[in-house]
Amino acid sequence: MAPSQHIDWLVENTDWFLELPASSLTSEIPACPGWTLENVVTHLAYGLGLGYPHALRAAPDSTAAEAFANVPWPTDMPVGPAVFTEFERTMRECIETFRHTDPGTPCFTYQGPGAAAFWFRRAAIETTLHRMDAVEGLGLSEPQLADERAGDAVAETVEFALPYAAQMSETSASAVAIRVAGSSTEFQLGFGPVAAEIAGDATSLLAALWGRSKDGVEINGDPGAASAWMSMVERAFAGR
């Protein structure tokens, strides 16, 4: 997907969250243990909306600590409906920053020196995952992600998110193949001989690889190897 498409996707997700009623903020989000919707919205407002634009301005060879050193994290976190106000402010500012940044601009990324497009894609997929979490927690229904978006999110998960989670948690796991139904593309997580295959439609794979629902995926081969990767986010980030 093109960087401009990732920004459009981020805008759609931002608008979706802003349409939720304030009364939903106290709803528990099972995919993020211990969190309510208020925690999810706060997490996105500051971790993404406030934090990501600073990564764009960081030197490519910065460490994460250096890249986010000057983020003006709030000392008093908003509560209740004010959470949505802050979410709208930081996310709209983030979106405008993205729109006025050349996607090829060199900058820090979690993978090391990279370009701004990394953050456009990361923001679109991060908000998508938490939108899926919110849909589950609020008992809503939505159509599956469009194939292009779901496939792109699975690709980013395999190329970046799960290897990064493995690095953060200092966890090694046997290699597994990821097969997207209806696609000729096959991904691999880990190195060496493939111990298992995880297959399913892209939306189901996205949920499973991020430690959410395993409904709709089929595991062939060593179930332990598949489980190790599907629980990697939980190990690294407590399921966030």
Image (cartoon, helix red, strand yellow):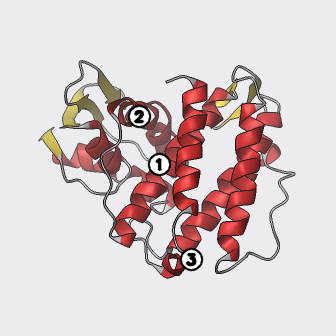
* Quadrant in the rendering for residue 175: top left
Q: Quick check: marks 1 and 3 in contact, CB under 8 Å?
A: no
Q: CA distance from mark 1 to mark 3?
A: 20 Å
Which numbered dot is residue 149? 2
Q: CA distance from mark 2 to mark 1?
A: 10 Å
User: The residue tagged with tag 2: helix, strand or loop?
Assistant: helix
SS for dot 1: helix
Q: Residues within 10 Å of mark 2 (few under 14, many from 20)?
A: many
Q: Relative to 181, say whether 32 is above or below.
A: below
Residue type for callout 1: Thr
Q: Taking 129 as reference, is 201 above or below it?
A: above
Residue 170 is situated, as x and y percent measured from the top left of the image, at 49, 47
Corner quadrant of residue 73 = bottom right
The residue that disc 1 covers is: 128
- Verify CB contact (< 8 Å) between mark 2 and mark 1: yes
| Of the pair 222 and 148, the residue shown nearer to us | 148
Q: Amino acid at mark 3?
A: Ala
Count of numbered labels shown in the rendering: 3
The percent coordinates of residue 194 (x first, y second) are 23, 28
Of marks 3 and 2, the one in the foreground:
3
Q: Which residue is mark 3?
A: 22
- The residue lying at 72 percent from left, 50 percent from top is 92
Sequence-first tag of 2 and 1: 1
Q: Crowding at label 1, few (<14), some or many (≥20) Cα neighbours within 10 Å?
A: many
Which x, y percent locates residue 96? 75, 40
> Quick check: 200 above or below 140?
above
For label 3, count other residues whose C-alpha is less than 10 Å away and answer few (under 14), some (14-19) or many (20+): some
